[in-house]
Image: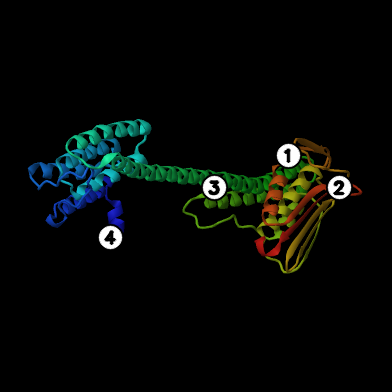
Amino acid sequence: MIDHWRRLDVTVRDLALGLLLAGLALIPALGGHGTQVGDLPTRPMDALGFVVIAVECLPLAVRRRWPAACLALVSLGFAVDQLWGYHTVSGTALPIALLSAAAHLGRFRWTTVAVASAAYVPLAFALARRGSTEGVTGFVTFYLALALAWGIGAWLRQTRAAEAEHRRFVAESTRTAERTRIARELHDVVTHHVTAMVVQTEAARYLTAAPERLDQALTAVTDTGRLAIADLRQLLDLLNPDHGAERLPVGSLRTLVEQTRRSGQPIEFTEAGTPVADDVVYRVVQEALTNALKHAHGRHTEVRVRRGDVDTFVEVATDGPKLSVPAGSVENGGAPGGPVSLRGSGRGLAGLRERVSALGGEFTAGDRDGGGFVVRARIPAERSS
């Protein structure tokens, strides 16, 4: 019932308020017990009184759609109501119209305040000429009561505007966070596989004299391409609004290490603790191995993962000279017969640092003593999956 009422047009709902107020004004027992400004003698209901009630109540139907027109008509009806002394309950429509105008009027709000205030002055003089005993104090008090209704409406308008601004801020923050997450997933999925394919293809150029090894290298390229396509499909499914998954599924670390080995990277892998599908742990190792393929292809790499009850510790170290990975291009030897030139954006390590820090962990990456490059991460075990 409530949902059906909310689905109705706002004019229909506001008309119901006006009809309710008009119905109360027509009840004989309530006659002469409405708003009284000027304290003029109460006049019995007649044909003009019915018109006054209609002019005061029915415009409430458009109080949100056309608040200025509503206020003007209700004010006119209220003035006649008080000058002729009907004093109907429908006089309550005036503070409602004022509140609605303050809350919903888009432009000329201060102009409306000035015009309404100016119109109140001749009404007070007209009531005084008709014998009103209200006095200046009474008229000022009633004006302040109307100003209070306007102030409540203005407060409602500001509250709605603040809520709308907050919703826009939350929506924009959510979109930004989602774009960042998608960029990270794309970087993690695409960069690793494509880097492996580039390195494998570069190595295959120098294996034309060894058909068996060439066939193995091309097979590795094909397998890596298939993995890239499969991961991209999973990511596209994840981006589908109808997809129920919250993140891209990750594989096992041993599978990742084995795939990198097929790309020509000698890796020593040790894993302590119960193996589990840790999203962040997987991404740290994946990015570190991707950098090893880019900047130190063919050099010995050690991957150590130790899972504890509280934290998971990851260390990926690559031998060789100091290999700090800058944001620009890097050229390092390693591919058979010549160097492999690959460009790094620096986005991967920065994204990992943000991921790990967001979980309350620690992340470092840089040159290690004696040469080479090392990536270390401490990830809270209960939050890494």
Q: Which residue is mark 4?
A: 1
Mark 4, residues whose alpha carbon is within 10 Å: few (<14), some, or many (≥20)?
Answer: few
Left or right for 155, reference 352 = left
Expressed as whole percent of the image width and height from the top left, the position of residue 60 reads 24, 44
Mark 1, residues whose alpha carbon is within 10 Å: few (<14), some, or many (≥20)?
Answer: some
Q: Which residue is mark 3?
A: 174
Left or right for 375, reference 380 = right
Q: Is residue 189 above or below residue 130?
A: below
- The amino acid on which the numbered mark 3 sits, given as a three-letter code, is Thr
Report how far apart the C-alphas of labels 1 and 3 lie in the structure. Answer: 28 Å
The colour scheme used to paint the residues is rainbow
Q: Is residue 363 above or below residue 54?
A: below
Expressed as whole percent of the image width and height from the top left, the position of residue 101 reads 32, 39
User: Marks 1 and 3: which is nearer the front?
Assistant: 3
Expressed as whole percent of the image width and height from the top left, the position of residue 150 reads 35, 42
Report how far apart the C-alphas of labels 2 and 3 lie in the structure. Answer: 39 Å
User: Which disc number belongs to residue 344?
Assistant: 1
